[in-house]
Image: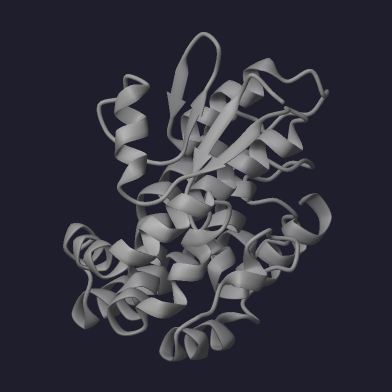
Amino acid sequence: MSNRTLYIFSISHYCEKARWAMDYLGLDYDVQPLMPGKHSVVAKSLGLARGSMPFLRLPEQVIQGSDKIVDWADSVTSSGRSLQSDAQLACDIEQRLDDLVGVHVRRHYYSEALVEHPSIVLPVFLRGLSWLDKIKLRMAWPMICKRMIKLMDLGSKQGQESLEIVQRELDWLDGLLSDGRQFLAGGSELSRADITAASLLAPYVLPPEHSQSMYVKLPPRLAQTADQWRSRPIMQKVLSFYAQFR
């Protein structure tokens, strides 16, 4: 048992980013999936002002946000590896991915899945929960769905808007790769930009190395879009990063 606990939603692509960074950098930790709603209670009990996931409890502090967790992991690792947290280009690409791609991949998915097919989302949220929390989540799921739809501003119009934003960002990422570079920020090693892109775009290609891929079911329209995008350079790079480094 580790003295580090990473609190996550099993379905979250930002949580996957934090897990990947810590795994790649050789840091031990325990994973604690939480049910929606309970995450805010746990966050408050740890002294956090908001419940944004993921957050990492250490003996001396609590770190919230995947980017901050990557910062910490890169500063303490003794693995000999680095995610190039001191490289400005890698950090700039990561920030754009976090602020645009991650947000709109999530809204694109949930605007169809949670609004029209909520039953396909529930099994992934149930992953790793205690038996009691599984019962609670099943009972509260209709109410939680309504709350999430309101908080994330979900709907068909919003989903289409997010799809178009993701499309533009994929064009940008394909452009970065058009010079033949192996990694998004250049250089010869994996960086935080690469694990961010791969983690946040993984829901479209469901890499077999991703611990949740076998439990995620894409809703029909999004599945069709994902199939059309699969051959894009950035999506092939996502699959390659997972195969090589995850």
Residue 179 location, quadrant: bottom right
Q: Residue 42, relative to residue 203: is it above or below?
A: above
Q: Is residue 76 left or right of residue 70?
A: right
Q: Is residue 100 left or right of residue 74?
A: left
Q: Residue at x 73, y 41 (%)?
A: 187
Q: Residue 42, relative to residue 60: is it above or below?
A: below
Q: Residue 194, relative to residue 6: is it above or below?
A: below
Q: Could one spot residue 51 in this view of the protein?
A: no
Q: Residue at x 55, y 34 (%)?
A: 6
Q: Residue at x 53, y 49 (%)?
A: 130
| In front of the other: 157 or 170 | 157
User: Where is residue 244 drawn, in percent x and y?
Assistant: 83, 55
- Residue farthest toward the top in the current orientation of the protein: 60
Q: Residue 17, relative to residue 113: is it above or below?
A: above
User: Where is residue 242 drawn, in percent x and y?
Assistant: 74, 58
Q: Residue at x 63, y 62 (%)?
A: 212
User: Where is residue 133 drawn, in percent x and y?
Assistant: 44, 51
| In front of the other: 65 or 232 | 65
How many numbered circles are shown? 0
